[in-house]
Amino acid sequence: MAIANVFGRHADPRLVEGITRDDGSQCGAQSITPFGPYDYSDQPAPFWLDYISDTGDGWDATYTVAYHAAQGKLTLSTSGAGDAGTDGILTERGSILVFGGDEVYPAASLEAYETRLILPFEHAFPKQDATGSLRLNPHVFAVPGNHDWYDSLVSFTRLFCSRGSFAGWEAPQQRSYFALKLPKSWWLIGTDLQLGNDIDGPQHAFFERLEKQIGPDESIILCHAEPNWINEKIYPDEYAYRSIRELEALFGDRVKLFLAGDYHHYSRHENGGGVQKIVAGGGGAFLHLTHGHDDTVLEGNEGDGPFYCRKKFPPRSHSWWLAWTNLFLFPIRNWPFGFATAPAYAVTASALITPDTQVSSVTDLLPHVVQRLSWEPFSLFWVVAIATGVVFFTDTSKLWYRWTAGLIHAFSHITAAVLLGGVIAAMLRAWLAEFRPEWLPWQPPLAALATAVAGYMVGPLVLALYLTLSLNVFRHHRDDTSSALRNPHYKNFLRLCITPSGELTIYPVGIRRVASRFGASDGSTHSRLHPLNGTRPFLIEDPIVIKPQQGTCSSRTVRQAGSCNR
């Protein structure tokens, strides 16, 4: 990450790309012009698109999403749980697939893309015969996220920007940003925010030229790699989206739908004018819990008012209970973390108490620790280093909370290490003196080893307790708590349909439990494997309908819009 941030900012490959790309070419039946849109406006309606973001983490979750997205027809259960049955809404596979960012985790490389992204999607939708038909050979476009940028976008460019193919999808994209001219006066625009939430000069110039081609009565779907509308509310001092604000102002109120990933859950905000801002980052990466910082109301423009949260999946209340499971599952799901706390606890105990410590209570141990801090430079250095590191780890933009919570967290670990080390040293010395006096010279290394074993077990529990309380009580450390939880379920993606009347209908597809067992295909689908367990896809909420001219949701959708806890 450090290397990517340094070299990504000082040797931006987007600038080189803007100079070296040619001025036009052909790819299949579609006219490709790097300085113009990819034109699909002559395609018949209804015209379907799929949007999947934050893929390429674990096989089970990624393949489950890829399998359902690759099927020619997909019936979405309306029961809210994906239960078996015949009820549901029939949808079709999109003629265009848009990846919304972070196509691979944790860092981009050719091998990571091959094993974590290409392989599951190739099994879900193998390459078809070259027919030139969008129905049989749909196209794919990809928005790069920060994880795609960790190798300076080299692997992403080779995969998506070389006019090749991706599994059963054709990949006509030539740059890391793009514009699609869709049927019925709709446009889809994908941006490249790089690592610093920045739109570079050539990219901005491209969109300035594009803006002149979009009529005042046409509508835009704007895709970013991360939801700037939420980050600005949560971290106002850390995220500066000046170039994004300029781009959004350039397109103005023609933008009817904002899409983003980065957060691995589903979240929808809506203003009084029916403009939708949707986060749909459930393509395969671990679940991001939906509670934490308050994003119920987000800033909007003066005319249509603020954006209100209408839906989250999973709901906030369910997410809150999921966070508590970290207390029990953290040591199991993150067992290698104990190898970090084990030596840390052993060194801390050795730095603050002497090997021949003989105390009978905690009050007797405290003066001993204070004396060590007063006389031993390494002891003081070690405590300061631990406190500083943990304070730096604390997730907040508020300085007072960072120091308060960070110091409490640090001294919780130090206290646990001292108590464990003191008790173990005293008990071990007493036992050796009585039963194995000849082993007394080995007491210090034996005590350190026993303290390390205890630190392996206790250290993760202290961190699990800190993360759980930080999120559920103080609304901080959502990313750390979520990644520690390692929950593969609650996936989502979007299926969009442009109707013959020009309306855009959004189907939020949810998968409550991903499959963990797969069998060979029975020939009923093109997919090479089919899930043997897991739940059926279902509608996270009722379809959202956007009318391009008025730019508002239908009355049916407005009536059915719920709250964040729905």
Image: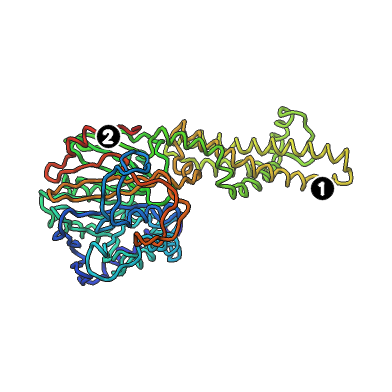
Quadrant where the N terminus lies?
bottom left
Give the residue pinned by disc 1: 442
Query: Which numbered disc, 2 or 1, marks the residue that appears first in the sequence?
Result: 2
Q: Image point 25% across, 42% down: which residue?
A: 543
Residue 441 rendering spot, x and y as whole percentages? 84, 47
**Disc 2 and disc 1 in contact, CB within 8 angstroms:** no
> Crowdedness of circle 1 by 10 Å Cα count: few (<14), some, many (20+)?
few
Q: Amino acid at mark 2?
A: Tyr
Above or below for 463 versus 161? above
Alpha carbon separation for disc pair 2 and 1: 65 Å
- Mark 1: amino acid: Trp
Near-viewer residue (87 or 82): 87
Query: In the rendered image, which residue does mark 2 sit on?
Result: 308
Q: Residue at x 45, y 65 (%)?
A: 111
Q: Position of residue 422 (x, y in %)?
A: 73, 36
Where, quadrant-wise, is the C terminus in this rendering?
top left
Task: Look at the numbered disc 2 and give the secondary structure of its residue.
Answer: strand
- Residue 334 image position (x, y, % from top left): 56, 47
Apparent side of residue 205 relative to residue 103 in the rendered image (left or right) = left
Q: Quadrant of residue 465?
A: top right
Q: Quadrant of residue 122?
A: bottom left
